[in-house]
Amino acid sequence: MMLAMVAVTIVMVLTMGFVLAQQTTINISKNIQYHANARFIAETGLNMALDRINNDAAWRTTYSNGTWVNGASFGGGTLTLKGEDGTYSATTGVVTGDTNLNNNTTDSLTLTATGTYNGVSHTAHVTAAMSVSNDAGVLMIVPNAASLTTGETARQTLLQSWGFTVTALTASSSQSAYDTAVASLVAAQTYAVIYVASTCTATDIAAKLNAYNTGVVCEQGQLADDMKLTSADGTGITATTPTMTTVTLYPNSNLSAGGVAVTTSGQPMWSYGGTIATGATTMATAQGLSTPAMLAIETSGSLTSGTAAGRRLLLPWGGTAFDFSSLNSAGQTLLKRSLEWAAQSPAVGSTTSSTTGFPTAFTSKAKKIQTKQIATKVTLASSATLNSIAGYHYGTSGKKVRYAVYADSSGAPGALLVQTGTSGVTSSPSWVTISAPSTALAAGTYWLAMSTEDSSIYYYYSSSGGTNKVVTNAAVGSGFKSTWGTSSSSGVKRYSIYMNLTVSGGALVNNSGLAVSSTCTPVWMDEP
């Protein structure tokens, strides 16, 4: 009996031990399962966040630095998600950044997700290194495109790091070279902007940029009067901290009103005096002065003479001695946002089509203007955007014509505003329509000009009711004269030529710069 009782006791002890061991194993198994579920919740949350970032171009403004999701029910447990500017260190457990998601599109982002399931939690981190594409091209104007200085190379490198495609053009190039470069840029890129480096001499550029509806960002303050933003050249001062005044436009809307240091040391900067264009916005004033240091104007805004063909912006710094490497993060961001703003045309309301000129096939005809450019005066009733020009002709099939628009100067053609390419005529009278670079025109007086390639090409006209001018120049081959000059003859003719235009039906809207897309390369880190 004693032996039997001992045996039973041993069996009972072994059985209890086995049961207890099984219970521990079951608990361990449950913990492993709960932790796996918690990890799945955390990593699924991170993947969902990464997917949102890659598919929402505005995520940096949609979300702020900090907690994005706090204890939300998810996957049978809860999810907490944080997004922070900077890079996570597994050694310190700290995210190093400037706590601002919206000030630099190339800043890394660290996402931290904590999944909880039945009391078990798991934390996972992913640091996303950003690469930015904005499909924007920059035509950078420099003294010598074939030999960039250290500062110009630094500009190019910085712009390329922001996703811009950068092409250099020598400032002293001819107007036709500018036309070709701008046309190529616009054709190749969704967005385009012209950037004038401070190393340029103003006289090399003068008014070459004025007719383009492509935006212009300028560091050379002595172009202020040439660009018609002021009536006088900018005056050079030494400063570091312009005072931000108007912070509603995108270029400086991320800054607070007041003094903002944009360089790490005293540098050549601009103070703009004289008469300021009525359509211009003073975005900053010069350090210690009340004069403008930074000016911007919207498309069709009123200049000191005429209206702006596209967005224009004068930066507060510049001069040949300006050290580009002195720009701090605020200065670099101001430059980047200025380029983004100028590269994108302002949105407009509803539009309608319109014509200006003489869309009538007059009965009188003449020819032999292959060595001449002739123009007739027209009146534009309201501001509009030029799309194309049409003229009525016939002659040897395939022989070409070219058209242009000149500004009025005291009742005669003045500066060339825009010219078309060439197009062939047919052997029977017909309208020849040629696309023109999209150009904003204010209400007022203009001159529509034409020239032909061959002496056999006829143009049509009325002998009364208008004003016409003639000057010697074979414009089909060499392009129209940049300024008309002295006319060889005048008359009262109206030519069969007109502009096709788009008239805005709404007010200009201040866009918030380019829509940029970001892609990220994640680096994962898990914590039990």
Image (cartoon, rainbow, N blue to C red):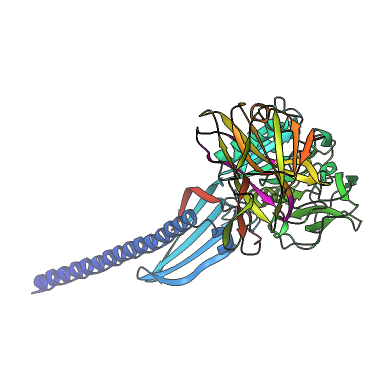
Q: Residue 369 magenta-drawn?
A: no
Name the quadrant containing residue 159.
top right
* Residue in the image at 50% along x and 48% along y: 519
Residue 26: image location, x then y, percent: 26, 66
Count of residue discs: 0
Q: Say left or right for 233 vs 478.
A: right
The residue located at (75%, 35%) in the rendering is 470
Magenta highlight: main SS: strand
The segment highlighted magenta reads 418-445
Horizontal side of 442 relative to 112 (left or right) equals right
Asked if the stretch drawn in magenta spans residue 420, the answer is: yes
The image quadrant that residue 161 belongs to is: top right
Q: Is residue 274 above or below residue 482?
A: below
Quadrant of the image containing the C terminus: bottom left
Q: Position of residue 193 (x, y in %)?
A: 66, 44
State the residue in front, 339 or 278: 278
Provide residue 178's location: percent of width, then percent of height: 69, 34
Q: Nearer the viewer, residue 226 or 120?
A: 226
- Residue 166 makes an appearance in the image: no
Asked if residue 50 lies left or right of residue 97, the reply is left
Image quadrant where one finds the N terminus: bottom left
Is residue 31 something one can see in this rendering? Answer: yes
Depth check: 382 or 505 in front? 382
Figure check: 329 above or below 116: above
